[in-house]
Amino acid sequence: MRMSQFCHQRNQRRVQSNPAHAFDSTAYFGRQTVDSKQVTTEPEHSAVSPASNPRKGKLIWLVVVLASAVASIAIWLVFSIPARVALLSGCAGVFATCFAVAPYVRFIDHGWWARYDEFRNQLWGEALSEYLWQFWHRRGADANALHDFSSGKPAVEADDAKRARWKNASALFDLIYKEQYGLMAFVTPLGFLLTAVLVGAQYVTIVSLRDLLPGSNDIFSLVKQISPHGAALSVSAIFGAYLFVVGDCVDSVRKGILNVADVYWYSLRMILAVPIATALTFALPDAVAVNVAFALGVLPVAFINKQLRRFASLQLKSEVGQEPDQIIKLEGVTAPIVSLLDAEGVTSIEQLLGMDPVLLSIHTGLPFRFVLRLGAQAVVRRHFGEAGFALSGLGLADATSVYSLIRQLTGPDADASGDADAASKVINEAYILLKGISKSDWPQQESVRFRFEEVARFAYTHFLMAAGFDRAPHGLPQAYSTANPKTSPASKMPPSGGSEPVGEVA
């Protein structure tokens, strides 16, 4: 597109003529940074935990096998089950439990760490400080992880002080991440789930072999009184729930989107499998009821709610035109994605910008970079309203593209290199386009440029640029010097907007 080609050609020309002109987004707003070598060898980032931890997986296997075996032996001894039945039920319980826990072991060994790396690939160094400033400001300030703006301008930091701040930011992010999505958070729901699976497997085996049970035991007498239809119905419901629990977990682990809430839902599904099947098949013929019980078991407890949300999302297209804030119009957003965002309470542009993108990515399962991309579009929509959707034809549909345009316009050598004239032409094209859409005297060309500058100043835009949208493949480019305020682009356009100022204050 016009804007992207313009930026690409301009950057190639300037970097080839003078490598020092490679631009760093944080320095553009008055931040100090280190050169690319220091960034690529950043100590705190290289010390991040490895991409997998097989020791935890082996420990989980050992605990699950031993716990299942001990529980099976306890059931055998407490209820005086015949040895043959106890052996079969114990083996079935251990196998079912181990099979159910297998995808979780894979997730804990690899999936959780891959998800962690997905966030750290975008959030490190100055980007991490920007993130904490934007969404965890109080805790970031207490941990000395934020840049100092007490004097109204970013304090000049030595390299050692900068690396210490980045290290504090990394430690705080690790703490917050583990609080919200740590492996220990899975222990309680996983314990509930495995207990329900073990009990269900024991029940299925004992009910299937109830003719081998002695009649002297009161418990066994009750088991023997279960009708053939009731036994078939309960076994069918448990098998259906087990299929859903394991199958959906495998799918979530494969996608890398397993959540703590999902495990709680799995536990509830196993616990309520038989009651739900009994209640919903009460009026059906016996032959049909058993099949329906299995089908109901495959469905999650939240199935009805999800279907209602999806149905509402499909109908949303006819309603979106009445509400300019609807997220459905953002590029890359479909009805299922709207359903995921709606489940997290995100139904408008302002809510999307106010939501922590890391937590939103975790809860919805959407890729972190995609969530940032939605945020970049939301910034433009916030400042231009419905007209912002028309800017995609010029390559100005997101905040990072607008940021790059304003950077070309206000750079220290923009006039000499001709970049300012080229950028002004793009702004004029945007003005003509927006004026044609508005069908009125609004907007004026000055107001279009002002809004573009507001987008570039916006705090969320700063965070996006620091999070890698302006990062060269070999690391952060060498920054403009901010020692001379007359040549620094930050002196021409101080940041504004958002919840907190994240750059030089005017």
Image: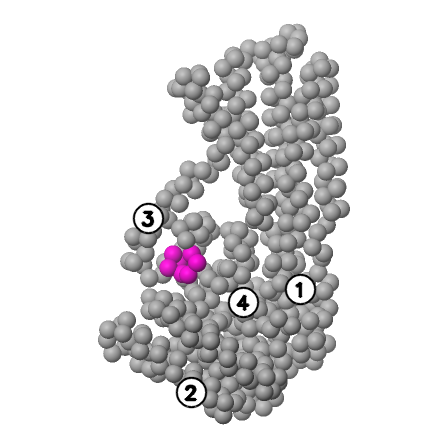
From the image, tell me which residue sits under label 2: 421
For the residues marked 1 and 2, what is the alpha-carbon distance in whole angstroms?
42 Å
For the residues marked 4 and 1, what is the alpha-carbon distance in whole angstroms?
15 Å
The residue nearer to you, when weighing 311 against 460, is 311
- Could you say which disc has been placed on residue 170 in the image? 1
Marks 3 and 1, the one that precedes in the sequence: 1
Q: Residue 264: where, in percent of width, then height?
A: 56, 39
Marks 2 and 3, the one that precedes in the sequence: 3
Q: Amino acid at mark 3?
A: Gln
Helix, strand or loop at disc 1?
A: helix
Q: Closer to the camera: disc 4 or disc 2?
A: 2
Q: Residue 317: where, in percent of width, then height?
A: 33, 53
Q: Closer to the camera: disc 3 or disc 4?
A: 3
From the image, tell me which residue sits under label 4: 134
* Crowd tier of the residue under label 1, counting other residues whose Cα lies within 10 Å: few below 14, some 14–19, many 20 or above: many
Image position of 54 with respect to 49: above or below: above
